[in-house]
Amino acid sequence: MRIELTFRLSYFFILVLIFSCKIGPDADAEIEQVVTKVEILPPGELYGDLFYDVQSKNVFPDSKTFVDAIPQYNPGLIRQRYEMLADTTAEGISDFVEQHFEIPGEQSEFEADSSSINLHITRLWDKLKRPADEEVSGTLIPLPNSYIVPGGRFREIYYWDSYFTMLGLLEDGEVETVENMIANFAYLINGYGFIPNGNRTYYLGRSQPPFFGMMVKTLANAKSKKVLEEYLPELEKEYNFWMNGENRLDGEKTFRRVVKMRDGEILNRYWDDYATPRPESYREDIHTAEKAVANNPEISKEEVYRNLRAGAESGWDFSSRWLNRDENGDFNLSTIHTVDIIPVDLNSLLYDLELTISEAAEFAGEIEKSEEYKSKAERRKEAIIKYLWSESEEFFMDYNFRESNPTGRLSLAGVYPLFFEIANEDQASQVTVKLKETFLKPGGLVTTPYNTGEQWDAPNGWAPLQWICFQGLKNYGEDDLAEEVSSRWLALNRKVYDKTYKMLEKYNVEDLTKESGGGEYPTQDGFGWTNGVYQKLSSKK
């Protein structure tokens, strides 16, 4: 496997660097000098027992803190020193980590700003911008150009977040920043064969919703159609990642992210190449797996880990979309079964990617390739309508291919076919009615109508989905509801900002006196995609 080969070569490079250092009184200093040149590994492999002990003994409240820490010595030396550590209590390990690592701050770096919200956001871009990375050891995958991070505990670039961030950057004239971010994603595609969830080694088993084609089209619209041709190779590599294994489905029903449907159509699911606890959510995943196996001995912990990771690839980590009801009729994270589900948002995005490749190929004069991808898009569109439109619910929804039925879970993912103009007029009209009757709340659109305690469910609303729904409604002339959604969301953003001077990751759209909640971590301040969508929607007023 390509990733495993990269890791093995990286480890060899580390050994070469270590043994090339002189041995003697100044050996530690010499090792420290080369740490910035060392390649990177996932945290379990990089730090060995230290990683597992830090995570399992609750040294940090947030499991993500340690995996983002920057080693101040060569990791090989840190491992050797840890093996000799006598005090392996949580306190002893904490002291050891403080002596050997730079620990990322947990507090927001943003100061209160009483300026107008639009000006505040414009100023925030510089605070959220990171320069091109030096090649330091740790889990960060260095990127060659500057980029925008979401903020808070999210200290690296994130894949699907970045599209919505770019909407605001372009409104503020930050074209060069958008160019740099897209170039970084192309760099990751060429280096790893896909865009990881974020530029961390612990994300190398999964991607996120494939918005790269949308990013390229957005930049092309801002600059020149030539951009489409420039990124055609990377667009195809991105597509090949998602379609990997398609040709072997004659004998198999599923392989990685591709699924052969009952009548032979090929659709996609979310996946992860590993079936282990997520390093950045290590304790949480172990707890979930233990609970799942206790409730259902027929499943394995590895299955639970895979499904948790696949849920993280969806970007909706976590949601009732991926859950069954337990014996009490409640949604419970231990029932997660993401890999059984054909998601409506993912397949809508891949439909658009197929059309984008077709358009780019046509611009490049590759007519045969253009027609090939146009045919792929038409086939996928037919399959989306066939499997993901629910006549009974009059809404688009995910499909459980194991059970050959819609999941029955209403969510704003069902509006993606309007955003990408897959729906027909009657379907769009019925979706509009459902949005008005079920999803529209005082602060905008709620993500799902189910209150589960997961952050991608009620009562939370999220900026990217407000934009998807706004534009999707506009595509079908449903201007009144689109404007109502926009007005309510912008008003909620302003209300919270006037009180706190913060832009939040998510908001409670049902009870405007309360903050958002649920999920594995507190609501984060920053916040990249909230800023981007606010600038874009407010520009429409």
Image: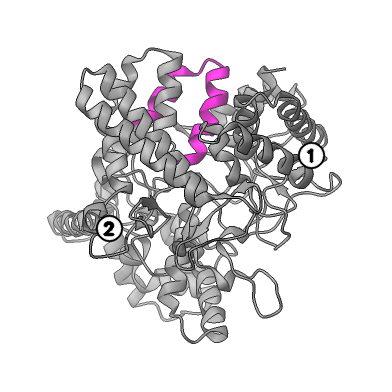
Counting from the top left corner in percent of width and height, residue 473 is at 65, 30
Mark 2 burial class by Cα count in 10 Å: few <14, some 14-19, many 20+: some
| Residues shaded magenta | 158-183
Residue 2 relative to residue 119: left or right: left
State the residue position of label 1: 443
The image quarter in which residue 330 lies? bottom right
Q: Which mark is residue 28?
A: 2
Quick check: can you spot residue 162?
Answer: yes
Q: Secondary structure at mark 2?
A: helix
Residue visible at 17% across and 54% down? Answer: 13
* Nearer to me, 47 or 179: 179
Residue visible at 57% across and 51% down? Answer: 397
Mark 1 burial class by Cα count in 10 Å: few <14, some 14-19, many 20+: many
* Nearer to me, 458 or 370: 370
Residue visible at 63% across and 50% down? Answer: 411
Counting from the top left corner in percent of width and height, residue 261 is at 38, 57
Is 486 contained in the magenta span? no
Residue 98 relative to residue 134: left or right: right
Look at label 2 and name its amino acid: Asp
Residue 381 relative to residue 526: left or right: left
